[in-house]
Image: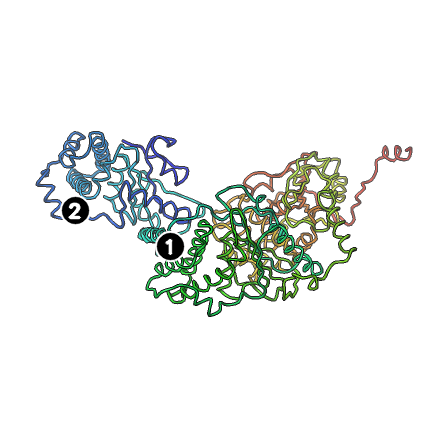
Amino acid sequence: MFEQKRIQNLNDYFLEPGSRKEQGVFFYRITGYNQEIHDFIRRYYEAARRSGIVIEGRIPNPLEKHLAYYGEIMGMDFTMNVGFISGSLKKWLPRMGAYQREQVSLAIYDTLDGMRRAGKNENILKNAYIKFMCWLYYKFERVVNQLGQQHIPKILYEGDIGNYELKLMAVLSRAGCDIVLLQYHGDAAYEKLDKASEISFAWKEENMVPFPENFHLGLFQEEMKREQDRERLYGKMPQVLNCTNAWISGKGLSDFTTGIRARGDDPNLFYNCFYRINGVEDKLAYLNELYQFQLELKNSGRKVVIAEQSIPAPAMEEISGVARKNYTEQEQMLADLAANNIRYPANPELERIMRKSFLDVMLEEAELPGRNLNKLTSKAVYLLCWMKRYQPGLFSNWKMPDIGCFIYLGGCKTENEAMFLRFLARLPVDVLILVPSLNGKCCLEDKMLYEMNFPESMAVERFPQENSEIRMGTAAYHAERELDALMYQDSGLYRSQQYEKANAVTLQTMYEEIEILWDQELKYRPNFSTVEGVVNVPVIYAKVSGVKEGALEYWSGIKRLMTEDTFVAAAVPCINSMEPNPVKPYVTEFFKNGKLQRGKIKSHSSYQYGFLREEIQEHILDKLQLLIDQKIIRGTFENGMEYTITAVILNMKKELLRMMQKFDFTRKNPKFIYINTTEEWMSLEDTILTAFLNLAGFDVLFFIPTGYQNIERHLNKKRMEEHQIGGYMYDLQTPDFGRISSHPRQSWRDKIFKRGS
């Protein structure tokens, strides 16, 4: 018989016997849902239909006529031994081979023996045996006849399984089948039948949610039918596909002027970009930059089309030029319009690319609410009119890997404009949408679109294509810009707030180094670097245990670390869990599949950080997500700990927010000193805060004169350095640091030697 083995991931089900880590079969039940599980069920469903069986709903009990036929052929005798079962199978299922018969008879005997050991009497065992035999004959003969072959038979069971059905699944599993149970209503009903999960394993993932209410296997049949229809609709597919934005650097116009061959070298791809730039970076230079940009494109031989403020609606003669008929079905309409209107005889490959893009976009449109056949036909005609209008300007004499450029100044005002640009972005065309005025909004939405945002707003009615339309910068202005680029690019010098993103790198130091590094600018610390626009910020994160050279020197040493940007938590706890937190009631709304919903957070009435610089708001949310993802706090993703973490970090003290607002990632970083002279544990909220501040780029120091463990309680593992600097002291009172000198009283030896020097 076969043993059940555990899987590392769901795709292990598709490994052939020789490729599996351990020889055996898989039997799992799935009680939750996510996209990965959806894709697995779809693939397993197809495999079970090819080489197994799909059970949708319960397996019907044998009918009277089935039992009568069984009695006529086999009689009603029953003997509880393998030989009897094997002989019966040979007569009842004669097409089974010897190996298959042996496996099934052993599996049936083992299952019945388990029932006997559980106290079932001979009559119950006989009834179960006859039920198994009828089910095998009428439902599973195709499955058992495949046992022992290269492809392991697959069984997919949908619904709440019954007792005898589960025992039959145990038989088939032990005989050599892979099995998946879909338990849409959770595990409670199943666990009544198999409390110890001895028959099957439960598949668990952190991001599983309950199955959608309308989920059922019939959906996959519908999906496959749609896909088959679409294959017939598309016809011969293009050999080259779009690689949109995957290659870009995210630097705006310079991505569009990147040489076509410098973008990538896969002959099966064309490399285009799809951008929207909102606002302007510099009002004085903006028009000049646009002029130079389009000039560079044209000088490089690129085809360029520019639209300003709107894409004019098709004229009547353009609409009448679209060949069309009366249609009764969507697929009929799309196939006919594509076949009769998308023509490019000079390059059949471009014609196939255009047809695919047209069909992709129109099928997406068809999924939107309110899209009846007449409305969809009208949209398709609009799209074809615009395609024919702009085709000569973008594609005359086209050959791989040519990329044209379509620039739209002003942004999409209508659904049809947005649809057309989505269509163009799937062709060998760079699509650039410029929205310099922040008073307007482009309505286009697309998963491929890359977006840049600048804070300045500027009204621009026409794209600058002649010198008279341009405001040119002065020589001094450009000299300043050139000097700026010379000084601050790869020179070791940095503009104020030059970088928007940073990653903290915790330094391992000796205790004596802390005071030396403490007030240094970050760029002078070891391991400082900038990589692709991100600063690697070296930070101190340490626990100082014990007292060196007495209490006075101890407090003076701490006083020396209190810079202008140092927050000192001298009372435990720093955050009182009983204080009102306006964010806490809403944090459950801020998550989806373990990820922060940033748009929802920022637009929520409880969000308190809207006054901060945008890049600092993003920095806070980045590090909050990182704190959760790395499970630094014990219990993350258990009992809602991630909600507590979010509530704490989105309700920080004003002093800390002010430090973050002025934080320049290349200069001095903010500091946080935590002093605990007592036996009191560090609170969960304080642990969350200090762990976050470390990730956010703060220097964080804990002074624990007692040497007690109190920081570590809520951490999954100890992350900070610990320095043992002297003996432990207890019952110290944290002084008023305003009265403490940062220079302790000198000894008589110091006075003599200093005087002599």
The circle on residue 444 is none
Left or right: 506 as drawn, with respect to 111: right
Q: Quadrant of residue 726?
A: top right
Which amino acid type corresponds to the residue marked 2 in the rendered image? Pro
Pinpoint residue 12: horizontal percent, then vertical percent. Answer: 38, 37
Mark 1 closeness class: few <14, some 14–19, many ≥20 residues within 10 Å: few
Left or right: 346 as drawn, with respect to 407: left
Between 174 and 267, which is closer to the camera in this rendering? 267
Indicate whether 84 appears above or below 432: above
Which residue in the structure is indicated by mark 1? 212
Indicate whether 3 appears above or below 458: above
Disc 2/disc 1 C-alpha distance (Å):
32 Å
Indicate whether 662 appears above or below 261: below
Which residue in the structure is indicated by mark 2? 62
Pinpoint residue 337: horizontal percent, then vertical percent. Answer: 39, 60
SS for callout 2: loop
Mark 2 closeness class: few <14, some 14–19, many ≥20 residues within 10 Å: some
Indicate whether 13 appears above or below 60: above
Between 690 and 136, which is closer to the camera in this rendering? 136
Pinpoint residue 204: horizontal percent, then vertical percent. Answer: 40, 43
Which amino acid type corresponds to the residue marked 1 in the rendered image? Pro
Report the quarter where the N terminus lies: top left
